[in-house]
Amino acid sequence: MKRIITVLVALLFATTLFAQGKITLMQNKPEIDAALKAYAAIWSKESGVGVTIKSVGGSSGTSLGQQLRADYAAGEMPDIFVIAGIEDYKDWESIILDLSSEKWVPRTSVAFKVGSKVYGFPVAVEGWGMAYNADVLAKAGVDPKTLVNYDGYKKAFEKIDGMKSSLGLKSVVSMAAAIDMGWVTAHHNFNSLLSNGLSYGDLSVVNNLLAGKVDAARLNEYADWVELLFKYADKAVLTTGNYDAQVGAFASGKAAFLHQGNWVDPNLKDAKVTFKTAFAPHGSMKKATDGIFVAAPSFYVIDKESKNIAAAKKFLEDMVFTSAGQNYMVVEAGMIPAYSNVTLKPTGQLSMSVQAWTAAGKVYSWSQYYFSGDFRDKTLAPIYNQFANGSITKAKFVELMTAAFVNRM
């Protein structure tokens, strides 16, 4: 009798828990869209709760922030959505649910916190430097260990550029700087200015820029790096290419370097890449910087006004504690898990490179998200785009970047 009562209580709880029967998750990583939808279908079958996945970003032309604002205004806010950091949190602070008591919290060291409270579920651990085709570098006689500063990259780029024909390359670097690809320039590349060469968590450059104080020497060195990448990139990919074009050029062996992170591993797998690849540091400074940028890139948060909070919480919990969820994160999506109980290891070459750099303690912070999405996307991204398409000089790039920080105050 006791067992029957227990079962009935459990069934009643489950019925109450998932009474709405559907949740919506909006995320900003199109490269994991197929894997996430496949996992959502598995979870839906097991739970009886429908899941709608909406992926916004990449080269879609609409940012996640823009779509969220439109959905909120229409009364169609997703139950689960993504924030990238403190500025995104400030935008949605009034509706983000406190997740401090969730089962997964003790299993991660990179949850998104404000004060002592946890608000964000870390999607993964990610990293980026300059991805390189090790086979091409070996044929060109370029040692990846020399790729630690501007001079090392300049010498390597010049040498490889002179051998493009014999190496089967169309460009040295696969880089994108179209307006729709501002997340490559004004998010990821921008972070080189903010944290390269600094101790992990050092916000000295960030805080100065937020206060309108610009280190001219550092900015000029950074401008040299941006110019170098743009100079040796395929101009079509650089100025008009989308994510698929940029990653595809590298995956097909037409570019020796790729300015992306380990999230491209699934794309390289789909392209059946056979060459060896790994990350080298960014060369945004004259001095050597022996590390890459590693952090939790984004966080799932739950709308506290949702009618499906219990189901949304369960969806996230099961991603961490079920074999299907773990398989999705590591095997299908190729992500580095942010949770200590997950023992699966990613097999993607770039993810393994991130883990190697992390294990060696050679990592720099992600600091771009201390600046608002609008500032990065609407103010900085167009400046990079103008520099890429040749409508402004390097001196003007420095001038406009300086003015952007000074005038944001």
Image (cartoon, rainbow, N blue to C red):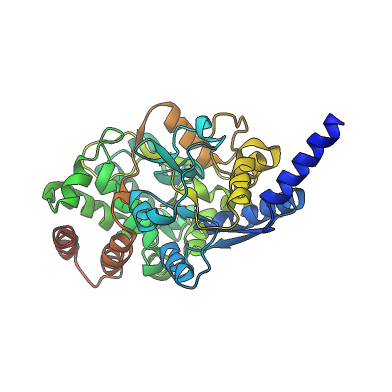
Residue sitting nearer the eye, 169 or 310: 310
Q: Residue at x 16, y 46 (%)?
A: 208
Hey, which residue is sitting farthest top in the picture? 360
Residue sitting nearer the eye, 11 or 321: 11
Indicate the position of residue 331 as horizontal and vertical percent values: 64, 42
Indicate the position of residue 192 as horizontal and vertical percent values: 29, 47
Is residue 295 toward the left or the right of residue 385 in the image? right
Report whether residue 393 is seen: yes
Count the marks.
0
Is residue 151 toward the left or the right of residue 56 in the image? left
Name the quadrant of the N terminus.
top right
Residue sitting nearer the eye, 234 or 65: 65
| Relative height, residue 159 to residue 104 (above, below) | below
Is residue 128 toward the left or the right of residue 103 in the image? left
Q: Residue at x 47, y 49 (%)?
A: 97
Is residue 167 toward the left or the right of residue 233 in the image? right
Report whether residue 162 is seen: no
Q: Residue at x 49, y 73 (%)?
A: 74
Indicate the position of residue 66 as horizontal and vertical percent values: 41, 68
Q: Residue at x 27, y 62 (%)?
A: 380
| Relative height, residue 346 to residue 396 (above, below) | above
Indicate the position of residue 85 as horizontal and vertical percent values: 37, 49
Name the quadrant of the C terminus.
bottom left
Hey, which residue is sitting farthest right in the picture? 1
